[in-house]
Amino acid sequence: MSEPLKLRALDDEDLAVLAACLQDALVPAQDMRYLADENRFVLVVNRFCWERLPGARLETTAAGPEAGPFERVHCGLTIEHVRKVQTRGFADTGAGDSEKLYEVLTILTEPGAGGGAVLTLVFAGEAAVRLEVERIEVIAGDVGEPWPTLWRPDHALDAGTP
């Protein structure tokens, strides 16, 4: 059994590695919170364990999935030094919507005002969380034991193209 994932991102390069590990993670909107008094944004995701694939590849090929089972694990994510949070594309109109799962695609970074940065958590279905931060400090850590899954996310290279 491999060690739980524990990562800390302090710059764009670190964040790119962390984002690759979180690709295809699933999270209900109710498991995301902005803790304004602590200048912190937190979430718990159901993370696909890309690093545990044969050969520890982080990318997916168009050839299709290898034979499972694969693994998923809960992973806590903390984004520090948050000044402002904006969201788009999250359903909040009905009781069942709070349990809708959002799939993490990536985390984007761009320079922010006053030497800070803007981090955007991009989800499938055009949902996003935009975070203005004083500086980049993102901590991710697996929580609990992984569990098996037969489903592996598949990102065919030509998906979505005519």
Image (cartoon, rainbow, N blue to C red):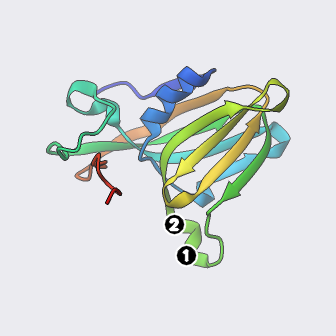
Q: Which residue is drawn at 16% across and 42% down?
A: 66
Give the x, y percent position of residue 24.
41, 47
Point out residue 64 in the picture as x, y percentages from the top left corner: 19, 47
83 with respect to 28 (left or right): right
Q: Which of 147 and 80 is in front in this view?
A: 80
Farthest residue, direction left: 67
Looking at the image, residue 141 lies above or below residue 75: above
x, y (%) of residue 153?
31, 49
Separation of disc 2 and disc 1 at Cα?
7 Å
Q: Where is residue 41 in the image (x, y as percent from the top left)?
A: 70, 42
| Mark 2: amino acid | Lys
Tell me the SS state at disc 1.
Answer: helix
Q: Which residue is drawn at 63% across and 42% down?
A: 120
Q: Residue 100 carries which label?
A: 2
Quarter of the rendering containing residue 3 = top left
Viewed as shown, does residue 40 lie left or right of 71?
right
- In this rendered view, identify the residue nearer to me: 1 or 92: 92
Mark 1 crowdedness (10 Å alpha carbons): few <14, some 14-19, many ≥20 = few
Q: Which amino acid does label 1 sit on?
A: Gly
Residue at image location 56% in from the left, 39% down from the top: 107
* Label 2: element kind: loop
Q: Which labelled disc corresponds to residue 68?
A: none
Q: Which residue is drawn at 24% across and 40% down?
A: 61
Badges 2 and 1: C-beta atoms under 8 Å apart?
Answer: yes
Q: In the image, which disc is placed on residue 96?
A: 1
Check the picture and name the quadrant holding the C terminus.
Answer: bottom left
